Amino acid sequence: MNGLAADLAMLEAVKAGIGNPACDVLVCPPATLLARAAVMAGGVFAVGGQDCAPGASGAHTGDISAAMLRDAGASHVILGHSERRRDHGETDAGVAAKAKAAWAANLTAIICVGESRDQRQAGAAQSICQGQLMASVPKEATIQNTVIAYEPVWAIGTGDTATSADIAAMHAHLRGCLPAHLKDARILYGGSVTAENAAEILALKDVNGALVGGASLKAAEFLRIIGAA
C-alpha cells in the first residue's frame, strides 16, 4: 500500500537506469497505478498485480479480478503474501482458487509461503512452509504459469534477514517438496532483501530471484539489486 501518481517518477528512474539486466524484472504497483505503470514500462520491465479475486466477475464490490489486471497490462500477480494471509485471513485453499483464476486470465501466479518467528523457534518452519506449498499450489501448476516465493514472515520489513544457510535449507526443502513437473520452478526469496545482501542471497543454490519489498521503493537501491542478479 505504497505509491501515488507522483511516485511513478521512481519507475521512470528505474527504466532509465536499468540498462540490459541479466534477469527478468517485475514491478507490482498498487492497482491504482497498474495501467499507468504498464504503459510507462514500455516492455523494459514487466508489471504485475499484488492480489486478485478468485472469481471472474460479479457483485463483489472492491474486488479486482485477474482479467481486470490482465486488461490493465499485468502479466503476473502476487498471491498469498503473508500480509494478505495475516490481515485478511486468506487460507491456502483461497490462494489456490486465486491461482486458478490467475491462470484463466493468462497471468503467472507468484504464490507465497512463509513461517512466523514463533513457528521457526518451535522448529516447525519447514513443515509449515511445506503445508502451505502443498495446499496453495494447485496440481495444474506448471513452471510456465507458477512461481514460488519463500518469505519468512519475521524477516519482512524488520531488517532481519534469514542467514544464507537458513535460506538455502528452506529453498532446497521446498524444491524437494515440489512434484516432478515443478522441480525446475522458480523459487524467489523475500524478506528484507537489500542492495547490500542481494548478491549473496541470489548466489545461493535453489534461489532463483528475489521478492523485494521496501528496497523496491527507492530507484537507486532497486537498481543495485537488479544489478546484483
Image (cartoon, rainbow, N blue to C red):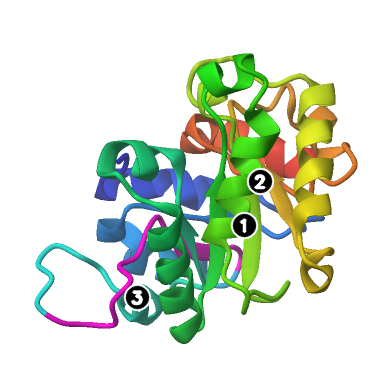
Q: Residue at x 87, y 37 (%)?
A: 204
| Res. 3 in view | yes
Q: Is residue 220 left or right of residue 85?
A: right
Q: Which mark is residue 134?
A: 1
Q: Earlier in the sequence, mark 2 or mark 3?
A: 3
The local secondary structure at tag 2 comes to helix
Q: Give the class, few, some or many, for how many residues have Cα within 10 Å of label 3's Cα (few <14, many ≥20).
A: many
Residues in magenta, as a range: 44-58
Q: Earlier in the sequence, mark 3 or mark 1?
A: 3
In this rendering, the answer to whether 14 lies above or below 60 is above
Contact flag, marks 3 and 1 (Cβ < 8 Å): no
Q: Is residue 55 left or right of residue 198?
A: left
Secondary structure mostly seen in the magenta stretch? loop
Contact flag, marks 1 and 2 (Cβ < 8 Å): yes
- Mark 3–mark 1 Cα distance, whole angstroms, equals 31 Å
Choose top left, top right, bottom left or bottom right for residue 38: bottom left
Q: Which mark is residue 130?
A: 2
Q: Which mark is residue 72?
A: 3
Confirm whether the magenta stretch covers residue 175: no
| Res. 199 in view | no
Q: Which mark is residue 152?
A: none
Instruction: Give the foreground label among 3 and 1.
Output: 1
In this rendering, the answer to whether 28 lies above or below 102 is above
